[in-house]
Amino acid sequence: MNKNQEQILHTIHQILSSPVFDIELGDNKYLLGNLIAKYSNCGKLYISEKTQTKLNEINFKLDKDINYIKYLYGKKSLLYRKHKIKVVAEHLIPCNIILSLILKSDRTLDNIKEIMDHNVVTIVLEEEDKQINKNKLRTKVTEDFHIITNKWGRYTSSDISVTENYIINTGNIFR
């Protein structure tokens, strides 16, 4: 866990420990979902096999430490400007599912961390992301989902394989 993740984890724990906190009030679900996403995005960002293949084809090298927004994110990124390739940082387990699991837990710092650490962020091609949407899995998991024994169902049903390659974002924390 890096310093950014540590701060976000403690913030989530403090919010959930507050006696006046009401998850149904205002945008609290949205707020916590964003914090969960940012926690994951501060860690390792794995590369899908199809993304890695596409990057290899155009000889686009990724250093381990990279500014995700500058090099990979959106139409202003170097990857898109030079090669017209769009990629997405995709959460293995949707953040709303992670939030639901946290809310069902005893909400201790250790349990919140354990739940959030099961999530993986993968850099996928735009078409891989669209396949998840087409499968109606944007904010859902497969019926056989289990956070420890079967968390890969969304990717398996969307034909997404993940390499061991990863990057660490050195730029701003993104959502």
Image (cartoon, grey):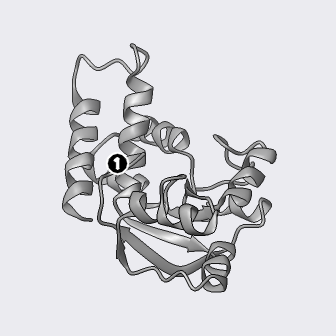
Q: 118 or 105: which is nearer to us?
A: 118
Point 42% across, 53% down: residue: 115
Who's the residue at 28% across and 39% down the image? 12
81 or 162: nearer the viewer:
81
**Image height of 149 relative to 5, above or below:** below
User: Which residue in the rendered view is the most extreme toward the front?
Assistant: 82
Crowd rating for badge 1 (residues with CA inside 10 Å; few <14, some 14–19, many 20+): many
Q: Would you say 23 lies left or right of 131 here?
A: left
Q: Viewer-proximal residue, 112 or 168?
A: 168
Residue furthest toward the top? 25
Looking at the picture, how far across and down is residue 136, in whole percent?
A: 77, 42
Give the total number of marks visible in the rendering: 1
Q: Is residue 1 above or below residue 11?
A: below
Locate residue 53, reporting x and y percent.
67, 81
Q: Give how far across and how far down residue 26 sits, in percent.
A: 40, 14
Secondary structure found at label 1: helix
Q: Quadrant of the N terminus?
A: bottom left
- Judging depth in this view, the residue of 80 and 157 nearest the camera is 80
Please state if 17 lies on the left or on the right of 174 as rendered.
left
On the rendered image, what quadrant is the C terminus found in? Answer: top left
Name which residue lies at 72% across and 45% down: 137
> For mark 1, what is the residue?
112
| Three-letter code for the amino acid on which mark 1 is drawn | Ile
28 left or right, relative to 14: right
Whole-percent x and y of residue 92?
Answer: 58, 57
Image point (64%, 63%), residue name: 84
Q: Quadrant of residue 129?
A: bottom right
